[in-house]
Amino acid sequence: MTKDKEIPSEYLASALDLEDRMSLEIYGELLDRNSWPDNLDEEVFENIKQLLGIVIRETEMHKKAFLELQKKIKQ
């Protein structure tokens, strides 16, 4: 890999790492019912899970885009 491709590749690796950590550490934790107050209404929690599902899917799309960019840089 040439020097001009090295820096963008490093940025993409960092972005991929961040996306992984967001999915697992933050969103995953928020999907756990035990992370929320006991008195949180179950319907509200279900709405939260649905919204987090959207965010998690978008995060996966970001990850796929970063992986595609990484492939193109390495070509």
Image (cartoon, rainbow, N blue to C red):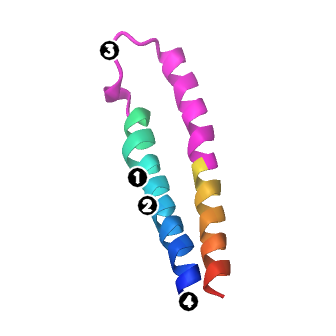
- Image quadrant containing the C terminus: bottom right
Q: Earlier in the sequence, mark 2 or mark 4?
A: 4
Q: Residues within 10 Å of mark 1 (few under 14, many from 20)?
A: few
Residue sitting at 50 percent across and 59 percent down? 15
Residue sitting at 50 percent across and 62 percent down? 16
Q: Secondary structure at mark 2?
A: helix
User: Of the residues tagged 1 and 3, which is closer to the observer?
Assistant: 1
Residue sitting at 62 percent across and 55 percent down? 62
Q: Residues within 10 Å of mark 3 (few under 14, many from 20)?
A: few
Residue sitting at 53 percent across and 26 percent down? 48
Residue on which disc 4 sits: 2
Alpha-carbon distance for marks 1 and 4?
Answer: 29 Å
Residue on which disc 2 sits: 17
Alpha-carbon distance for marks 1 and 3?
Answer: 26 Å
Pointer 4 and pointer 3: residues touching (CB < 8 Å)? Answer: no
Q: Position of residue 68 (x, y in %)?
A: 66, 72
Question: Is 37 on the left-hand or right-hand side of 74?
Answer: left
Residue on which disc 1 sits: 21
Residue 57 lies within the magenta run? yes
